[in-house]
Image (spheres, rainbow, N blue to C red):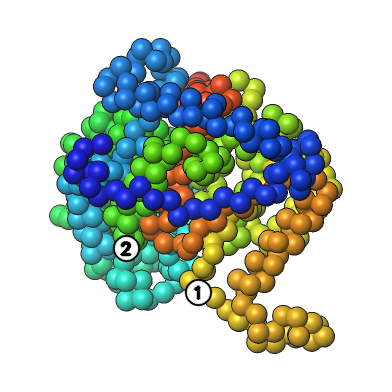
Amino acid sequence: MADDERDLISGTNALELDWAGLQVERVGPRFGITPDERATLAPCICALHEQIQQERVDAAAGRSRLLRDSPDEPLDYGFMDMPARLLGVESALSQRIQDLADQLAEEADAHVVLGIGGSYQGAQALFDALLPTYFNELPRQERGNRPRIYFEGNNVDGLALHDLRQLLDVRYHRYGATPAGRFSLNVISKSGRTLETEVAFSVLRERLRAQGLQDYSRRLVVTTGAEGPLAQAAREDAVPTLPVPDNVGGRYSVLTAVGLLPAAVMGLNIRQLLQGAADFQAYCDAHPDPTDNPAWLYAALHVRAYERGATTRVLAVWTRRLEALGRWYDQLLAESLGKGERGATPLTIVATRELHSRQQQHQQGARDKVITNLLVRDPGRDVTVEGLSFDPRRAPEVVGRRLSELATLAVEATNAALNEDHRPTMNLCLPRLDEYHFGQLVQMLMNATVMEGKLLGIWPFGQPGVEAYKRRWDELLRSRPAA
């Protein structure tokens, strides 16, 4: 870390990990951690911590080929240093991201993010977590003078793309070639060869051009790798581009231009996102002992549970605003750890919604799950129960309570019911949902995933299994002409 970066970083952690529901006293010997096991965690984790630090140094020095000889196993540690770099030595790139975002927001009242997998999941998580729930329904002035946000290019769903195109056409026919009637595009693909995204771009690019060729390039940004057909096309059309770093894998790229440009278009404070992540990374780097490091402890506890038979890991988010974050994390875990016929199956649920469906299985189904509750201590906005209509007899128990208080009691009740039947749980808590703490959370989860891979003997970068379906799809497209 350069001196100017070090001066900006406080090295603090605001996340709390409560793992009482994984201690032997609470859930018994199968999944419970004994005092002796707690004592043995530190030496192993500390050794792997040092290994990770050395691999980061080697990667930065260009010695990665000495470590990994397979293109399926890249050394993608760049996400760890990226937040500090964007606050320090690469702050000019952060400013360019902000300037392009402000331009896109000024030019149009709808912004479409085209990408799939890691190219959009982080941006979707930011949108859901940090903006008002019904952001797109608000008048522009109540959206902070920012555009409505839409996500496409993440499927081959003709109905969805048709309906988005129709919506954009309706607004253009109503308001004409004005910001209120026009839309802007951000096309994201590291390789520049992602078929789902390319198809959506080809459909929407013609609409974008029809809304004005003279300023076409002011309403389009391409986020891609240095080479590839998308980068080449952007250069030929003089379209602004932003980089996807070579040393950052797609699922780890939320705090690069991949996630930061959409965040800035939304009106979020990208410096605070980066600051939270950089502060956590500095804290993580300085604390090898899992007793002091929630990322390392979180990883160790999940690996321990997996080795004892918890092959399904459930992330229970206690606000809908974090459901997309859960899907982002599902991808992070599945692609990083699902290799060599190993790796737990990730599953995100929303509580208390899924307590009325999946909880039956969690409480009395197969003993193959560890459940982590992702909690927000201060919801920021809340509602107080003023009365009950269905069963007024319960009014003394409920009326006057805030919904966040009901949720807190539901978390406690759910954990107690599961632990009583020797089913493991833990709680991961954020102080509040804002840019700073979101940055801390995603940086913590990405670090934890790397450590889990180390503990399991699984390389946490690359996703060679994803390429299999792509090869088969390409073969079928070449062998079967269009109808």
The quarter of the rendered structure image containing the N terminus is top left
Disc 1 residue type?
Answer: Arg
Name the foreground residue: 181 vs 462: 462
Instruction: Tell me where residue 473 appears, x and y as whole percent.
Output: 52, 27
Q: State the residue position of label 2.
A: 267
At 38% across and 57% down in the image, what residue appears?
A: 436
Which numbered tag is attached to residue 381? 1
Instruction: Tell me where residue 181 appears, x and y as whole percent.
Output: 30, 67
Q: Which is nearer the N-term, disc 2 or disc 1? A: 2
Q: Is residue 264 left or right of residue 296?
A: left
Instruction: Tell me where residue 396 appears, x and y as whole percent.
Output: 76, 85
Q: Is residue 230 above or below residue 405?
A: above
Q: Is residue 28 left or right of residue 231?
A: right
Name the foreground residue: 208 vs 362: 362
At 37% across and 23% down in the image, what residue appears?
A: 54
Instruction: Tell me where residue 118 appears, x and y as whole percent.
Output: 44, 40
Q: Is residue 400 left or right of residue 368?
A: left
Q: Secondary structure at mark 1?
A: loop
Name the foreground residue: 7 vs 72: 7
Q: Label 1 crowding class (10 Å Cα cut-off): few <14, some 14-19, many 20+?
A: few
Which numbered tag is attached to residue 355? none
Marks 2 and 1, how far apart at CA: 19 Å
At 58% across and 62% down in the image, what residue appears?
A: 319
Q: Is residue 394 above or below residue 254?
A: below
Q: Are marks 2 and 1 in contact (CB under 8 Å)?
A: no
At 29% across and 48% down in the image, what residue appears?
A: 9
